[in-house]
Amino acid sequence: MSRWFTRVGWRHLVGVLAVAFSLFPILFVLSAALNPLGTLSSTELVPQGASLDNFGKLFTDTEFPRWFANSVLIAGVAAAVSVFLSALAAYAFSRMRFHGRRVGLLALLLIQMFPQFLAIVAIFLMFSTITDLWPVIGFNSPWGLILLYLGGALGVNTWLMKGFFDTVPRELDESATMDGASHAQAFFQILLPLVAPILAVTGLLAFIGTINEFLIANVFLTDTHAKTLAVGMFGLVAGERNNNFGMFCAGTLLTAVPTVVVFQFLQRFIVGGLTSGAVKG
Amino acid sequence: MSTQVRGPARGRAPHPSPPPGPRHSERSTSATGLLVKAVMLGLTIGIAIFAAFPLIENGHWLGLTVLAATTAGLCYLYGTRRHIPAKYLVPGTLFLIVFQLFPVLYTVSTAFTNFSDGHRGDKQDAIVAIQTASVTQVPGSTQYALTVATTGDPATGPLTFLVTDLKTKVVSAGDAKGLRPLPGSRVTVNTAGRVTAASGYTLLNGAQASVRSKEITAFAVPTAGGAIRSQGLSRAYEGRAGRAYETACDCIRDNKSGKTWAADETVGAFVASDGERLAQGWKVGVGFDNFTRLLTDSDISGPFLRTLVWNLAFALLSTGGTFVLGLLCALALHSPRVSGRSWYRILLVLPYAMPSFAMLLVWRDMFNTDFGLINNLFGLDVDWFGGVASARIAVILVQLWLGYPYMFLVATGALQAIPRELTEASSIDGATPFAAFRRVTLPLLLVALTPLLISSFAFNFNNFNAVYLTTDGAPFPVDNPMNGATDLLITYTYRLAFGGSGAQYGFAAAVSVFIFIIVAVLSTISFRRTRKQEEVYS
């Protein structure tokens, strides 16, 4: 018995404890979402009765579907474009040698350390002008926010990707070039398919990061129908938190859906991609 | 090493497909390539033309020049066959410059000014504001019928006063810039003289107006000798300014008392001989004042240092704690003997999939003293966010929960990349499993994961959501409502810049610059230590 414990048993013990730690807040959210009373003070780990009232109220009393659509649009487009932009840059940094390459890589690292939202006052003033000139990309527009998020596209992602690109043997795209492929063909048709894992990982990280981004979105999106999930749902519990808690938890569960979908979609790449980029850094 | 090239890679690697163009075409760009390039360049020019019109209309000639130069540069870059690296770097770099570098530089320059509430615009703005604020109704003031309107959302859009002079029946629109007449063809006026419809404006109905009544009362339309202010929601008057600017003495004079406040260009304010300062000032450069204040003013530097120490501890504990916890789980489940590993993995990673902003708010409620889950579940009666130690423990605990699944995933991946032969060899040599882990596995893991740990540290150092959405800095000392025990530098900065008691943008920007320097120094040192940049130098 003790031998079994030292070999396998402790592993299950750690696993079970960790799962319990992982799950109990989620069970709490689930319970609150199903609890027909829908208040914080009435919520327990095991719900007293179950109904989908909170979900119904979320869709009738709030602009939740709009927020959901906004979030998916913003996070989806921003993640996809930022992955593409950093893949382009990583290709140049990995495969080409040019003046300013080293400086460029270090500069990227340094600029990224100044988080964008530290400059929120400057961004606010800048976009006040932009809103006057081009309302399409101004405040309360998803497009302006997407552009702003793309400002951070280069940076950590580029580093992670460059590390991964370096592991793909150079001979592959070089031989394609010998065969007459242009550098663009070598990039799009040879290299990109090979680096799918790291594209998936950075895409997922960017998607999760954007969907959870609160500070900039909160300054940017003030119209009810322009809000993202983070901003809208924060407003839901900012004023009447006790009463809206059930709705809030229902919204939380639904917000997890896009992340889980993206995660499932990319899962086979994730584990390998997360670490190999770092290994090769 | 070959493990990285997975999935689609395996099949394609030896046979690059589809075949990249015919051999004899001496590397000519393919037809599709040309077409794509033409379309993209056309789009760029189209967007540039679209963007140019508002710039021309508003006379932003500098902006127009930059736009034209950028577009021309792009056309040149993608039109030639040279500068291949730049072709790949420019798209991302453009965004980086406009939306990251420019705001950062702007922030740095703001750190050297007194930019704050009351010091927003230039001197002229301050004079207008002072005169407008001192407006009082005097006998014989012009009376107006008032309709409150906006050009945007009724709840948040900028206010405009649509006023009808009760004597002349002239209708005008007034905003913070001043009054301008509205042609009769654009408005409908009822018998009482109030505007009932105006093209280009959204009129606020009674309910909407009363919600914003505070704003409306504070709103003033500057005019030559004073300002138009509201009197209730349907009347307005043009009052006379009680204080006026006099060019001769470069000062503000109060018409009643005769007191004067002289302009002081070094502090950007009007100051009286007795030292009294008017609240409305203007923006001036103050050199290193904000920085020296941060370091020398003991009321500020004390709390600032305390926050910095806690901030470092927070980042270290969050990163280290999640790493240890994640690694422990990964080690425990990294054995073919454990049945149901994939189930463990799915359940363990669930917190990672939940939206963190929402879960932070949920955790805040789970720590609620009266009906929070934690106190209920464990039969405690702890005022979690009331005490310094318990609030800090709570914040760290939440970070552990949110962060360890990521570390678990990462550590699992790294463990799989370590060849089993290495640990087997050490056990044949007589090493205990623990020694094998400490001497062989852990060093290899750390080589792989240090860059991730560093970026995780940098992220946690500025983890705004973690504090803002849970404790919001609480608990606060009695004598300092600006700087709480769980405040990170970033939440402290946010409160300085956007807090209720007067925004201090200049000072907040100085703190931002400090944060940047600290993070940059810490990261540079650690990156150097990991020899991560070897490849860069090659």
Image: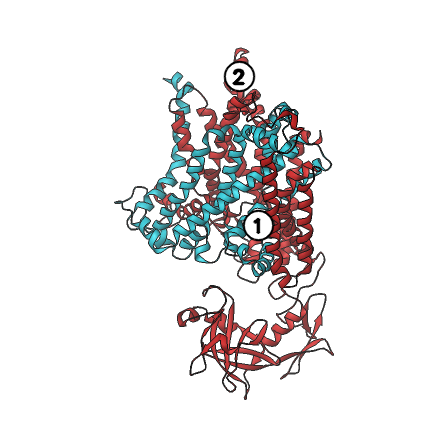
Chain colours: A cyan, B red
Across and down, in percent, residue A268 comes to: 46, 29
Across and down, in percent, residue B495 comes to: 55, 55
Across and down, in percent, residue B506 comes to: 64, 58
- Distance CA(mark 1)–CA(mark 2): 45 Å
The amino acid beneath tag 2 is Thr
Across and down, in percent, residue B40 comes to: 59, 44
Of badges 1 and 2, the one in the foreground is: 1
Badge 2 marks a residue whose secondary structure is helix
Q: Which residue is at the front of the view, B434 or A153?
A: A153
Badge 1 marks a residue whose secondary structure is helix
Could you tell whether B354 is left or right of A154 in the image? Answer: left
Could you tell whether A35 is left or right of A189 in the image? Answer: left
Residue extending furthest toward the bottom:
B140
The amino acid beneath tag 1 is Phe
Residue extending furthest toward the left:
A49
Give residue A156's quadrant in the image: top right
Q: Which residue is at the front of the view, B386 or A228?
A: A228
Could you tell whether A33 is left or right of B55 in the image? Answer: left
Residue topped by disc 1:
A117
Please tell me if label 1 and label 2 are on a single chain. Answer: no
Q: Are the residues tagged 1 and 2 within 8 Å (C-beta)?
A: no
Q: Which residue is at the front of the view, B87 or A51?
A: B87
Chain on which label 1 sits: A
Residue A68 in sight from this viewpoint = yes
Residue topped by disc 2:
B423
Residue A204, above or below A237? above
Residue extending furthest toward the top:
B428
Could you tell whether B133 is left or right of B268 in the image? Answer: left
